[in-house]
Image: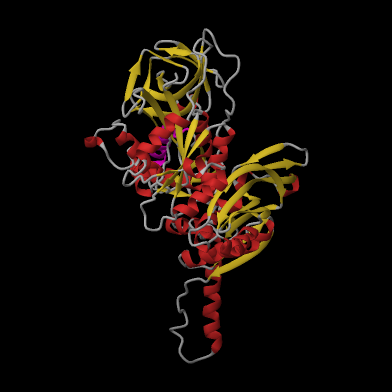
Amino acid sequence: MKNIRNFCVIAHIDHGKSTLSDRLLEETQTISERNMQNQALDDMDIERERGITIKSHAIQMYYQHTDGVKYTYNLIDTPGHVDFSYEVSRSIAACEGALLIVDASQGVQAQTISNLYLAIGHDLEIIPVLNKVDMESAMIEEMSDQIIDLIGCDKEDIVLASGKTGIGIKDILAAIVDRVPAPKGDVTAPLQALIFDSVFNQFRGVIAYFRIMNGTIKKGDDIRFFNTGGEYSADEIGVLQMDQVPKKQLSAGDVGYVITGIKESKEVKVGDTITLKENPCEIGIDGFEDVKPMVFAGIYPIDNDDFEDLRDSLEKLQLNDASLVFEPESSVALGFGFRCGFLGMLHLEIIQERLSREYDQEVITTVPNVSYVAYTKKQEKLTINTPNDLPDPTLVDRVEEPYIKAQIITMPEYIGSIMTLAMDKRGILTNQTYLTTDRVELTFEMPLAEIVFDFYDKLKSISRGYASFDYVMIDYRASELVKLDIKLNGDSVDALSSLVHKTKAASFGRHICKRLKDLLPRQQFLIAIQAAVGAKIIARETISALRKDVTAKCYGGDITRKRKLLEKQKKGKKKMRQIGSVQVPQKAFLEVLKLNEG
C-alpha cells in the first residue's frame, strides 16, 4: 500500500486539465505514441469540441521514482462544470491528494476555489500547478502570489508547467510521490469501497468504479450496496488502465472496477459503499446523497409518431447518465412527450445535443423551470415541477422556491455592472472580499430560477469574459410566484405557461405576446393573444384578420350599399372566429421557447 498514490486533478473549465493529463499519460508510458490523441481521457465528441470534461475518468499509471522504487498512480479525473459538483465531491473523497491547476494567464477562478474547498474539507494534500507558463500572456509572478494567498503555500511548492510543451511534467510526477500521502486502511477489516463513478457497457451491463478504503475484494465475492441494499456477485474485478485489466483480488488503497451484470444504471449510485454480503461493514462512507435534478423541461418529438423512438433514446442515454430523470407527460399543444429533470442548463444542452447526434432525435424543449414547493391551506406539501402542477390560488397558502449561494470572482472594474445584474435577478449581496488587489469575490443569495436562463451568458458579456461563477443550493424560501398563462382567443396554450415572480409577470407576459404576434400566421379571423394571471389579463396583442375587399364591386351610388356588404362580412368573420381554432406552427413554438427572457 505504501507504493500507491491516489490523486485527482481540479481546475476551472479551460485551464488545461485534460491536456496536462495527456502529458502525464505520455511521460509514464501508460499510452503508446501510436494511440495518443488530444484529450485522451475524454471519450465524447462534445467533450473534445467544447473543451470540457463531462464524465469523470480514472486511469492507473506506473512511475519509476529517482529512488528506484516503482509507484502505482491512480489519477481520478473530475468534470470542471458547476452542474456536476456532486460527481467532483465523490472523486475527491476517493483520493489523498489533488493537483490544483491554475492558468498562468487567467488566474484563480470560482470553480477552482469551490473545488479546492471540497478538497481541503476532505483533508487532501494540495499540489499547486501553474499551467500554460510558456504563453506570452502568462503572468507567472502575479498568479503565483494569488495561489500563495489562496492556499498559504510557499513559492517553492508551486510547480510551473505547460500541458502543451511538457514543461514541468517530471516535477509534477516527483511531487506526487514526495507530497501525497500513501493510502491508509486496514486490509483485514470488513470491505468498505466508495463508488465514485459508473459507466454502462451494452455487453457487460453497468461497470462501477470504486476506491477501497478498508478490506479486500476477490473475484466471485457476493457483494452488497450499502445504501440501496442491492446484492450481487462480483463477476469480474480489475484495475483501470487504457483498457480494463482483470485481477483476482484488490485490497485497501486500490482503485478499480467491478462488473456484476446489472442492467439498470439506477441500481448503482455514485457515492454508495460496496461491502461484502457475508461480513458487511457497520457504517457506509460519509457523503452519499441521491442526485437531485435542479432544472425541469419538457422534451417533445417534432413528429408525434417518433414518441416511442424518443423513449428508447432517453432510456439508452439514462444508462450512461444516471442523473437524467424523465417521465411521460402530454400537452394539448405539443402532444405526447417527456418531463425531464437535469442537473443544470449545461446538462440540458448536452442531453439535447446527444439526442440529436447519437440517436437522430430532433426535439422541442419547453421553457425550463426549477422545482418549487407549495403548501396548501391544510398545510399539505406539494412538489411543483411544471406550472400545471400548481393548484388553484385559492387553495395555496404559500409557494417556496429554491435559493442558491452564488460566488462570482471578477476584476474590480466590473463590480458595479455585476451587482446591477444580480440585483435585477432578485439577488442579495452577502459578502465582498478582495482576494488580491485586482480580484474580488462577490457572494450573493439569489433564486435558482433567475440564473437558469441567461444569467451566465449575461455575466460573461458584461465582464468581457473576466468573471467566473459557481453556486451551491442553500434552502427553499417563501416567494410571491404566480402562474402566467398564455391564451389564444381565450384558450390556454399549456406548453407556454410558466411560473414567474409577481414583479416580473407583466413584462414577461408582454414579451411573449409580442413574440407570438410576430410569429403566428394571420388567419381569416381576428386572433387575441393574451397573458393572464388567474382571471386577470395583464398583456394583450391582436393579430388582425385577413380581409377580402368586398366593396370592390360597388362604385358610386349610396354609402348604405357598402355598409350593408361590410356588415355581412363582419357577421361572417364573427361566425368564423367561433368555429375556427388557432393552430400554432412548430416553428413558432421553437422560436418562443428559445426566448428565455432575452
Q: Nearer the viewer, residue 555 or 133?
A: 133
Dominant SS type (magenta) = helix
92 shown above or below 437: above
Q: Nearer the viewer, residue 174 or 242?
A: 174
Residue 511 at x, y percent in the picture:
57, 64
Q: Residue 228, how many percent across, how many down?
A: 55, 21
- Magenta segment: 306-322
Q: Residue furthest top?
A: 278
- The image position of residue 477, as x and y in percent, is 71, 45
- Residue 317 part of the magenta-drawn span: yes
Quarter holding the N terminus is: top left
User: Residue 558 placed where, x, y %?
Assistant: 53, 90
Query: Residue 538 in magenta?
Result: no
Residue found at x 50% / y 71%:
545
Q: How many marks?
A: 0
Q: Residue furthest right?
A: 378
Q: Residue 242's image quarter?
A: top left
Q: Is residue 397 left or right of residue 596?
A: right
Q: How is the image coloured?
A: secondary structure
Residue at 42% in and 58% down? 587
Residue 450 left/right relative to 394 = left
**Is residue 284 at least partly visible in the picture?**
yes
**In this orientation, which residue lies closer to the viewer: 219 or 265?**
219
Residue that extends furthest to the bottom in the rendered view of this protein: 556
